[in-house]
Amino acid sequence: MTATTLDKDALKKKYAEERDKRLRADGNDQYVRLEGRFEDLAADPYTPWKDREPVTDHVTFAFIGGGFAGLVVGARLKEAGIDSVRIIEKGGDFGGTWYWNRYPGAQCDTASMIYLPLLEETGHMPTEKYVHAPEIRAHCGRIGNQFDLYKDALFHTEVTGLEWREDTSRWLVKTSRGDAFTAKYIGMGTGPLHVAKLPGIAGIEKFKGKSFHTSRWDYGYTGGSPDGAPMDKLSDKRVAIIGTGATAVQAVPHLAKATKELLVFQRTPSSIDVRNNEPIDPNWFDSIATPGWQKRWFDNFVDNQSQGFPEEDYVMDGWTELSRRIREKVRQLPPTQWTPDSLLQAFEDADFEKMEEIRQRCETVVDDAKTAEELKAWYRQLCKRPCFHDQYLQAFNEPGTQLVHTDGQGVSEITETGLIANGKEYEVDCIVYASGFEVGSEYTERAGFDPVGRDGLSLSKAWEDGMRTLHGVHVHGFPNAFIVQPSQAANLISNVPHNIVDHADTISTIVAHAEAQAFNTIEPSIAAQDAWVEMVLSGQGMLIGNTECTPGYYNNEGAGLTEKNRHGLGHPGGAKAFFAHIAAWRESGEFKGLDFS
Ligand code: NDP
C-alpha cells in the first residue's frame, strides 16, 4: 500500500475525531501521585529498608539519582581520576527506572546495542536484540561494581535540600535520612519518568481487592518473579489492567497467560509494530565489537534519524525504519524538490503508510474482528510512544482475555469490588495500574527538591518562565552543578542513554579540567546561557507538543506546548547537530561560555 492509494483526507478527519473524543479540560490534573495519598502503593516492594546513621562528611561529587545517569557520570568521573563520588538514590539499589520497573515482560524498546550504556567499557554482550529487564538491572549493578560506585552510595535516600554555600564554595546536601554532607560538585539525573501516577478515577480509594502500580509489582500476590517465573497465584483470579501504553503492552501477554480472566481497560490504543526480537550471536558480536564500536553504533543510529542518506543502518529497529521510509520517499523526488515542505510531506506520507500497516496487523493477528477494530490506533506514529511487540495483539486471542474498549473515555469509576466503564460494572480481584508516570509538572516538583544557588536563588525561581541552561547541563547562578537530561541539548528521545553518555563525557571532562587547574567554581556566563536558550527557542518542536495529536504526555495531554514548556525543546538542528557541536566544544578545551575561578 502507498500513500497515493490511501484517502489521506478521510484519515486526517478520523484522526481529528478520535483526538477530540479524548480531549479533557483537566489535562495533567486527571492523575494523582502514589506518594502522599497512596503511601502503601508507593512503598518499595523489592528491597528491605535498612537503618543507618546519618552521613555528615564531604565528597567531591554528589549525584542525585542512581539510574543510568548517575551510573554513567559516576563511571566517567572515576575514569577521570575523581574517586570521591557519592550517588544518592531513592530506590534500594542502582537501576533507576529499571530498579522499579520489574513488571513481567519488561524489556528495552530500543536495540540493546545502543540502549545499554558502557557495553564496551564493561565488556558485556547483550543476550538479545532487545534485552529483558533483569539483564538491564544486572548491567546497572555491573557498572556500579566495576567503577566502585557502591562504596559511597546512599540507597533508600531522597534528597530534600541542596544549598550552595558561598563562603566555602560547597553544596550542602540534605536528605530524608537526616544526612547533611557537603560536596564540591553536584549532579542531578532524576529522570523524566520516575514519579508513578494513578488515574484520579472517582472512588479509586474504595477498592477492597488487591491493587498496585506496574512499577511496584507485587510478586507476593501474583506469584512468579521478575526473572520470568510464571505468575502461578493468578490462575483463579480475575484481573483488570488500566492503561494500554508501553508498559501494559509488555505486561499483558504475561497476565493473559497467568490469569483466569484478564480485562484490559483501554482508553487509547497504542500502535503495535513488529518487534522481531532475536538472540545476539556471539560470533557476530565478536566480529563487530572492535574498539570504538558502541560510539560508532550511537552515531549511526543518530545518522539514520537525521536528514541525509547514511549508507548503512546498523541498528535496524522500529525507530530507524520510519526514517528509512521517509528517506525512500525523498529519494523518489528529484533533488530540486527537496524543500522543507516536501520533506514534511514525505514524512506524513510515510507515516500514513506505516500506521495503515500497523492497523492492518490488528486484523491479521486478532481473531475477533470487533476486538481487532478496537485495537487500531488512529493518530500519527509519533503522537504517542510507538510500541513494538509480537505477543500483545496475540494475547487477545487467549480465551480469558477481554478488551474493554472505552472509546476514549476510560474507566469512569472504581467501586469496592471492581470498575465501571461504558456504564457497566466489572467485578475483579485485582487492579493493575499501568497508568504511567508524571511528566507535565515542573522539574523541581518531580525531583522533590529545589536547589538553592547563589544569593538564595532557587531553581524553580530561576526557571519560572521556562528552563534556562547552557547545553541543557549548566545553569547560571548554580555553580558546580550539572543536570543530566535531554532538553536544550540533543533531545534524542528514541535513545535516552545516548544523551546521558554524552553529558557524562562533558561533565567528567569539565570536572577533570577544573580539578587539574585547582579551580573552585565552574559556572556558565549569563550571556552564554541566554544565547543558547535563544538558539534553542528558534527551532520547531516537530510532533512533540503537536495539538493535532491525540492527548498524551507527548503533547501535554492535548494542551500543546505552552511558552514555558517550549523551553524543553532540543537543538534546532536535531540530535546530530547537538552531538557534533558539543564534541567540538569539549575537544577545544576552551569550554566557551563557562567561567572557571
Ligand atoms: P503511559 O503514560 O504511556 O500510559 C498510561 C496509560 O493509562 C494510557 O494508556 C492511558 O490512556 C491510560 N489511562 C489513564 N487514565 C485512564 C483511565 N481513566 N481509564 C483507562 N485508561 C487510562 O504509561 P506507561 O507506563 O505505559 O509508559 C510510560 C512511558 O515509559 C512510555 O511512554 C515510555 O517512554 C516508557 N516505557 C518504556 C519502555 C521501554 O523502553 N521498554 C517500556 C515501558 C514504558 P491514554 O492513552 O488515553 O492517555
Image (tube, rainbow, N blue to C red):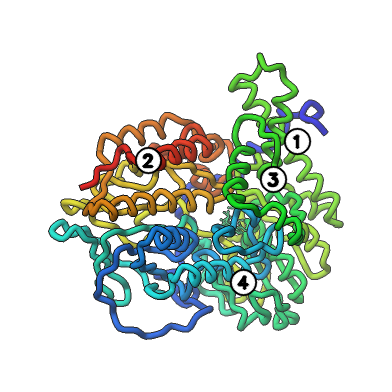
Name the residue beneath numbered marker 4. 431
Mark 1 beta carbon near ligand 1 (under 8 Å):
no
At label 4, counting other C-alpha atoms closer than 10 Å, the crowd grade (few under 14, some 14-19, many 20 or more) is many
Residue marked by disc 3: 314
The picture quadrant where one finds residue 74 is bottom left
Measured Cα–Cα span from mark 2 to mark 4: 36 Å
Q: Secondary structure under badge 1?
A: helix
Q: Is residue 510 left or right of residue 385?
A: left
Q: Secondary structure at mark 2?
A: loop
Marks 3/1 in contact by CB < 8 Å: the verdict is no
* Amino acid at pointer 1: Glu
Q: Is residue 197 above or below residue 221?
A: above
From the image, which quarter does the N terminus lie in? Answer: top right
Assess mark 3: CB under 8 A from ligand 1?
A: no
Between discs 1 and 4, the one toward the N terminus: 1
Quadrant for residue 566, please give it: top left
Residue type indicated by callout 3: Tyr
Instruction: Give whichever of discs 2 and 4 has the lower sequence position.
Output: 4
The quarter holding residue 241 reads bottom right
- Indicate left or right for 366 with 220 as reference: right
The residues bearing labels 1 and 4 have C-alpha atoms spaced at a distance of 36 Å
Residue identified by numbered label 1: 353
In percent of width and height, residue 310 lies at: 66, 34
At x 78%, y 63%, the residue is: 395
Q: Amino acid at mark 4?
A: Ile
Crowding at dot 2, Cα within 10 Å, few <14 / some 14-19 / many 20+, comes out as few
Question: Disc 1 or disc 4, which is closer to the eye?
Answer: 1
Q: Is residue 569 visible?
A: no
Secondary element at image label 3: loop
Which of these two is toward me, 522 or 343?
522
Query: Assess mark 4: CB under 8 A from ligand 1?
Result: no
Between the C-alphas of marks 2 and 1, the distance is: 34 Å
